[in-house]
Amino acid sequence: MVAGISLSLVTAQLSEAAVTPGTKCSKVGATSTSKGLKYTCVKKGSKLIWSKGVSTVKPFPVTSPTPTSTPTPIATPTPTPTPTPIATPTPTPTPTPIATPTPTPIATPTPTVAPTVSQIPERSGRKLCETKQSTSLFQETPRTSSSKNSSNVSLWAKYSLTRPNNFEQIVRSVQTDFTKSYLGIASKVPAIDFYIDPELKAEANLLTQINAVIKVVQIEYLFLERQFDKPISVVFFTDWDWLEKIHIEGGCSVVDASVRANKRLDTAAGWATSDNSALYLNFSGSKRNDLVTGTPGWLAAHEIFHLIQFNHFAQFAGRPPFSIPGWFIEGGATLMSPLVLGMDTTWLIQADNQSAQRIDTKSSLEDLSSNSGRNYSLGPIANEFLIYLVGFNKYLAIWKEMGEGKVFANAFPDATGIELKEFYAMFEEIRPTIGIPIL
């Protein structure tokens, strides 16, 4: 028993004894463990030797940590503000409607509107040079004014007239009166023969201008009390040679055609000839741009009113007497353009002030010469003032009275009820008030 125990201890010690790899061992397959290495006896050639040691220490297992998922952040809710309570309005009781009496409408006469043309209208066949023949001579019989005015009675009180406070008051009154004067009497419109220069037929704005002329004629010829039984001629031209040619073809002599197509007239944008009832619109040279930039109907309204004026003298071949002042003839025609086209006329004051700086700076209306440029600026203001005083119908009646053979100084009071000298005095009195003082 004791001997067995001792043998076991020796074997244990051998197994722990140090072994050197490559050294001699006794038995193939024998093993020896030392310092955590296990050596095996192997045969190498004819020798038995110890192999290299193999570790017998088991490594401690390293546990890989389970990855923790990143938590999804939970959005912190934004607190909803508590709404401020809105006070409920107290309803206003609906008032009981009061029936408004419906006024009985007053029929406003409407002028017959001229149809818009889409091409140049055909002519009537009347010759351009078919002139009016004078059946009598105009004989003026002047008379002395019988006007006597007391020094202590104003002219405004004498004629029961309202003195205007400003020019705008005159303008509003005249525009209203003018509109009432021509409504509803469109049966007297004459036919129109258009003569269009071939060079102008391609102009884009030509038909616009033609339609404007038709409208102007429709309005202005309503001012005549008698039926106008013959067509009027309206000539659009840019070529002076063509203008002369159509007069020869229209029955004029070569001399007459040359006079009517005289290039000395080129300074004018337009003119009217009463003996053949013709209106000429000059678009030669730089004036050709007026077809596009000019106000359609503006020049036509001026010149056509001259035909209206002179038509009152048909029995005198359309030639008015020389006693008619320039401010009344040219001023009336100039005023007609904005009136017929429905435009404001307050710009006339500024225009005349500018004109007065250059010409006739100290002239009164009565003293304006017949060829003064202010007939076209001060003149229309005086005509508008006259219409303000007596109305449009009495204003036109001045021409009717002259057509019966009266001189202007006599026709004026017979038509208006105001002596001419006293009209001049009232106009000079209100000039500073309306913005045209004598400089």
Image (cartoon, rainbow, N blue to C red):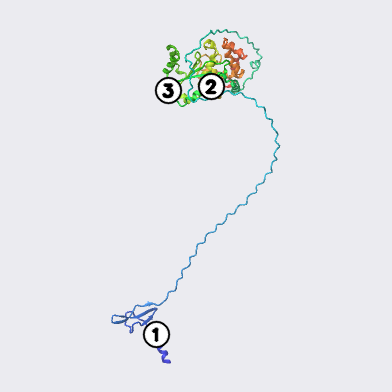
Label 1 to label 3: alpha-carbon separation: 140 Å
What amino acid type should be assigned to the residue bearing mark 2?
A: Val
Q: Quadrant of the N terminus?
A: bottom left
From the viewer's perspective, is 324 left or right of 23? right
Q: In terms of secondary structure, where does tag 2 sit? A: helix
Q: Which label's residue is closer to the chain start, 2 or 1?
A: 1
Q: Position of residue 210 (x, y in %)?
A: 49, 23
Q: Position of residue 330 (x, y in %)?
A: 53, 17
Q: Which label's residue is closer to the chain start, 2 or 3?
A: 3
What amino acid type should be assigned to the residue bearing mark 3?
A: Glu
Label 2 to label 3: alpha-carbon separation: 24 Å
For disc 3, the marked residue is 199
| Residue 439 appears in view | no
**Tag of residue 13:** 1
- Closest to the observer, 403 or 37: 403
Q: Residue shown at 58%/13% (left/top)?
A: 400
Q: Nearer the viewer, mark 2 or mark 1?
A: 2
Count neighbours of disc 3 (C-alpha within 10 A) and say few if under 14, some if 14 to 19, many if 20 or more: few
Residue occupying the far left of the picture: 46
- Closest to the observer, 103 or 77: 103
Q: Position of residue 288 (x, y in %)?
A: 45, 23
For disc 2, the marked residue is 216
**Tag of residue 403:** none
Q: Quadrant of the C terminus?
A: top right
